[in-house]
Amino acid sequence: MNDRGQPMRAVAARVLQSVENGQSLTQCLPLALDDVADNERPQLQALCYGTCRWFHRLDAELQARLNKPLRKPDRIVHHLMLVALFQLRFSQQATYAVLNETVEACRALDKPHLTGLVNGVLRAAEREGEPDWPDDSARFSHPRWMLEKLRHNWPGDWRAILEANNAQAPMTLRVNARRFIRDDYLQLLADAGIDAAATLFAPYGIQLASPVPVDHLPWFADGAVSVQDEAAQLCTALMDLAPGQRVLDACAAPGGKTCAILESCAELAEVVAIDESADRLPRVQENLDRLDLTATLEQADAADIDRWWDRRPFDRILLDVPCSATGVIRRHPDIKLLRRESDIVPLADIQLGLLEAMWQVLAPGGRLVYATCSVFPQENHRIIRRFLKQQNDAALVKPDVPWGRDMDTGRQLLPAAESHDGFFYAVLEKPEP
């Protein structure tokens, strides 16, 4: 029990129930962290992320150990046992502590009549060890529909994708090119005792051997570096930025790519960053302020150009569209619980609609970079094919880059366990009249 009166495992169970009810960890975990003592916050976060990461495996085991499902009012106890199973299978926590404290958490959740069940299930799990997995969904801990879709789309890579999704993502930095040369910042990290190396593809990227709090990074508060995956950093080179250009970052929040654009070319005429979510734009401004950068922020639906566009065309557009986020599952394991197969077609329609709208605001001679953090072709190169069939004045550019796979209309990066996230990029240009 912590000094706020909430057993940490009970709080974790409530978070998991919120995720099952459709909230992301990004939405519900920050509130839950206020319910535990400061020194328990890292462990609570690890419990929630870890249980989501291995949810389908843990849930398959738990269901096999229950004679019948718990009643809906007692569903919270199902999540409590999942948290305990995660600790038994994937943590160094002492078994007696997991069992005893989970039973106490069950009482704190006002479910004292289920303490005997909780104790019995967990003791059997500890005594018998992990079961044989009934199928690949449990073995690789992914929803069945997602696993089958990956198997169909990537027959030679699906296992590697699933394994990468279950790995802990590395911490990767983007050096602020206005402030530091990458080699110089690597030396600062070495002087601070932080083991790091240059990324293979992103010219300003640095990957840490182990994550550290950002306040341990030299000059972080003064804008020396930002935390950003290597795959996400690759957009700026594809944009072919030059002084005097007017640039649009559509769907910009939380602003990492907006800042990367501004850092990579100091004499742009203007960078406009729009996002539909008013709640997320302050985060964009915070990032700009820390890095001492300036952009024009606008809260709007990018597709509704009549509402926000001032009729001045853009020379460069970055369109990082809403997507299934299946390339960043290792960073957001709750995607496995939140995403549904039925989401993909509506997302593809949104993506194509945004691409059509952005084409209207692109200047003749301008370039648009289409990006997703998805590994599903339905959201990626198939969208570009659909667009090119209907847009006569769109020219496909095939960038000469050493990364990703050539998908005919773009480059696909698959998530790599020790490296970058999964990402797709396509480059389109509007010819001069």
Image (tube, rainbow, N blue to C red):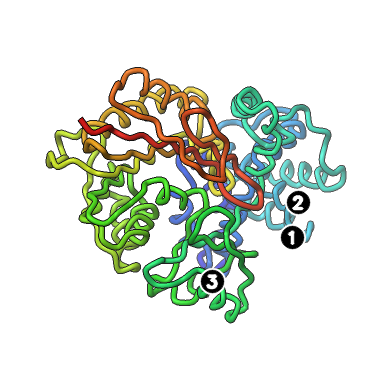
3D distance between C-alphas at marks 3 and 1: 40 Å
Indicate the amino acid at tag 1.
Gln
Q: Which residue lies most toward the left here?
A: 310
Quarter holding the C terminus? top left
- Crowdedness near tag 3: few (<14), some (14–19) or many (≥20) residues, C-alpha within 10 Å: some
Residue closer to the observer: 424 or 397: 397
Residue 183: which disc? Answer: 3
In contact (CB < 8 Å): disc 1 and disc 2? yes
- Crowdedness near tag 1: few (<14), some (14–19) or many (≥20) residues, C-alpha within 10 Å: few
Residue 217 placed where, x, y %? 51, 73
Q: Which residue lies most toward the front here?
A: 433
Residue hosting label 2: 88
3D distance between C-alphas at marks 1 and 2: 7 Å
Q: Which residue lies most toward the bottom here?
A: 191
Residue 93: which disc? Answer: 1
The answer to which image quadrant residue 370 occupies is top left
3D distance between C-alphas at marks 2 and 3: 42 Å
Reply above or below: 83 against 325: below
Indicate the amino acid at tag 2.
Leu
Q: SS for tag 2?
A: helix
Q: Earlier in the sequence, mark 3 or mark 1?
A: 1
In contact (CB < 8 Å): disc 3 and disc 1? no
Q: Can you tell which of label 3 and label 1 is closer to the viewer? A: 3
Q: Is residue 317 left or right of residue 427?
A: left
